[in-house]
Image (cartoon, rainbow, N blue to C red):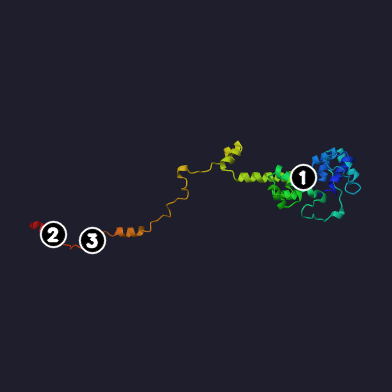
């Protein structure tokens, strides 16, 4: 969604000069509803001069009146033909010089209260570098004794919606990593009763025969099997074994008769 110029200053002007709801102003300016509430209470954007979106050709009076009459309606930015074809410049977040000294405090707050955030997410939120984040994590920063955790939203270094989106993304990533390490039994415990009853049971071997899943007798052959079969097929008698002279059967019978 395209945001107006100077969104926070525009929100200040809309809070002071219109009866729009906080949700309408927050969505139009790309802010969190609590930020708009803080602007109305004087806790956020103190001393900031409002930026008139009507005088700067971003809104029309008719559009504001339409949304004031219908709280469910949403403000639409006035079409600017000069902005057609523009591409958003990609690069590191720009931090004003007056707020750069507050970045270590914001990093300390994020590290303390949102340890699930990755260094890349913190660097994108606050506009800092990974070595600075690591030094604050390890408490080796040169000015660590003077660093006190402060909410980066209160310091104006990032928006509440950006912080919420980063925390939600980190939580989803952490939950996915934990689910990948869970066993099948733990997954079944977390499943609903209707799902677990309809899930097919997984085949398992008894614990007494565990480790023999890949055991088979199909490929086990005795290299000496063929030789033993060949030797067993040729029968050897005692005469041929001891080289005894063979006598005719008739002579042996005659000798027995004479005796």
First in sequence: mark 2 vs mark 3: 3
In three-dimensional space, the C-alpha distance between marks 1 and 3, rounded to whole angstroms, equals: 103 Å
Looking at the rendered structure, the secondary structure element under dot 3 is helix
Residue, x 91% and y 44% (percent of image)? 61
Q: Say few, some or many: other residues with alpha carbon within 10 Å of mark 2 (under 14 / 14 to 19 / 20 or more).
A: few
52 with respect to 136 (left or right): right
Q: Is residue 248 above or below residue 42?
A: below
Mark 2 or mark 3: which is in front? Answer: 3
Image marks 1 and 3: residues in contact by CB distance under 8 Å: no
- Looking at marks 1 and 3 on the same chain, the residue that comes earlier in the sequence is marked by 1
User: Does the image show residue 72?
Assistant: no
| Residue 220 picture location, percent across and down | 41, 54
Residue 10 seen by the camera = yes
Report crowding for label 3: few under 14, some 14 to 19, many 20 or more residues within 10 A (C-alpha): few
Say left or right for 174 vs 101: left
Q: Which one is nearer the viewer's eye here, 6 or 248?
A: 6
Q: Point out the residue furthest to the right here.
A: 55
Position in image of residue 51 (x %, y %)? 89, 46
Comparing 49 with 10, the one in front is 49
Which residue is identified by label 3?
Answer: 241
Q: Residue 218: x percent and y percent?
A: 43, 53
Circles 1 and 2, Cβ within 8 Å, touching? The answer is no
Residue on which the image places disc 1:
152
Residue position marked by numbered label 2 in the rendering: 252
Task: Tell me the mark number nearer the camera, choosing from 1 and 2.
Answer: 1
Q: Residues under labels 2 and 3: Cα distance?
A: 21 Å
- Give the mark, 1 or 2, whose residue is nearer the N terminus: 1
Count of marks, rendered view: 3
- Neighbor class of circle 1 (other Cα within 10 Å; few <14, some 14-19, many 20+) is many
């Amino acid at each position: 969604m395209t945001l107006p110029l100077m969104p926070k200053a525009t929100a200040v002007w809309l809070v002071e000069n219109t009866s729009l709801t906080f949700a309408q102003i927050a969505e139009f300016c790309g802010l969190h509803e609590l930020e708009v509430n803080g602007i109305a209470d004087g806790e956020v954007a103190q001393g900031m001069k409002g930026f008139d979106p009507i005088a700067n050709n971003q809104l029309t009076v008719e559009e504001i009146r339409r949304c004031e009459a219908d709280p469910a309606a949403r403000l639409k930015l006035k079409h600017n033909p000069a902005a057609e074809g523009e591409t958003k410049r990609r690069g590191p977040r720009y931090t004003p010089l007056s707020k750069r000294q507050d970045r270590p405090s914001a990093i300390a707050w994020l590290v303390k209260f949102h340890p699930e955030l990755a260094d890349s997410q913190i660097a994108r939120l606050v506009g800092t570098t990974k070595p600075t984040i690591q030094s604050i994590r390890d408490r080796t920063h040169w000015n660590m004794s003077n660093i006190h955790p402060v909410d980066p939203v209160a310091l104006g270094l990032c928006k509440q919606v950006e912080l919420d989106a980063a925390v939600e993304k980190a939580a989803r990533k952490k939950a996915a990593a934990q689910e990948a390490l869970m066993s099948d039994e733990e997954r079944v415990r977390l499943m609903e009763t209707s799902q677990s009853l309809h899930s097919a049971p997984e085949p398992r071997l008894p614990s007494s025969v565990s480790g023999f899943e890949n055991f088979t007798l199909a490929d086990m052959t005795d290299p000496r099997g063929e030789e033993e079969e060949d030797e067993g097929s040729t029968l050897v008698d005692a005469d041929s074994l001891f080289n005894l002279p063979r006598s005719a059967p008739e002579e042996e019978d005659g000798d027995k008769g004479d005796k």
